[in-house]
Image: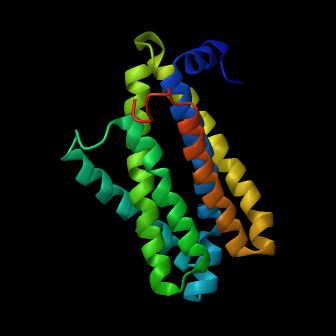
Amino acid sequence: MVPARELRSLARARPLARATFTSVLSFVGVGMLVTCGPLLGEEVLGSAHHGAFLLATSAASSLAANAFLSRRPGLLRPDTQLWVSTLPLAAALLLAATAGPVLLVVAMVVAGLGEGPQLTALFAVRHREAPECLRGQIFTTGAGLKITGFALGAGLAGPLAARSLSGALVVAAGCQLAACVVFLTLSPANGAGT
């Protein structure tokens, strides 16, 4: 059960609530992608075992993106980086839904370019916005909500992919776009990067 005090703190600080809702919804799509990984490996690359290669490709890209951004700390504000990172995730999911082998690998690279910076930006927003006395609990609560989103996505992907693998990936891309819309909707009128 999520403690009420942490939920109140998440809801009170608008940037924190915005970042949390955005990341949870985005992670519904990521959960769908991970579930579809072995199916993509089998359908596009010839073996379900290649799904692990696809996920490793995304992870390596994620690490490279964060290494690049760590050398340019002022390039994007964390809030901007958070919502902008949903766009390559959406593009990657759409590309994966239609791609052959080479484009599928490219899609996984693009997915990593969104996923790594999104997590880094989320941590930066949480650290900045969470009251110091509740920071640990808010990080834990936020992580729990994000994992719940991932689990929901994984659970949705199974039945959807059984009907249509590309359809499941399109729905996952829709989750990324919805996360972007949620972020922009919860942003103050003066801009999304604040």
- In the image, farthest residue toward the left: 71
Where is residue 128 drawn, in percent x and y? 37, 23
- In the image, farthest residue toward the bottom: 46
Residue at image coords 54%, 41%: 23
Q: Quadrant of residue 156?
A: bottom right
Where is residue 5 drawn, in percent x and y? 61, 12
Where is residue 174 drawn, in percent x and y? 65, 57
Comparing 126 with 167, the one in front is 167
> What is the quadrant of the N terminus in the image?
top right
Residue at image coords 44%, 42%: 82
Comparing 61 with 48, the one in front is 61
Comparing 194 with 63, the one in front is 194
Q: Is residue 117 left or right of residue 89?
A: left
Q: Is residue 42 left or right of residue 78?
A: right
Q: Quadrant of residue 157?
A: bottom right
Residue 27 can be seen in this image: no
Q: Image height check: is 35 above or below 77? A: below
Comparing 100 with 159, the one in front is 100
Residue 11 can be seen in this image: yes
Q: Is residue 171 left or right of residue 94?
A: right
> What is the quadrant of the C terminus in the image?
top left
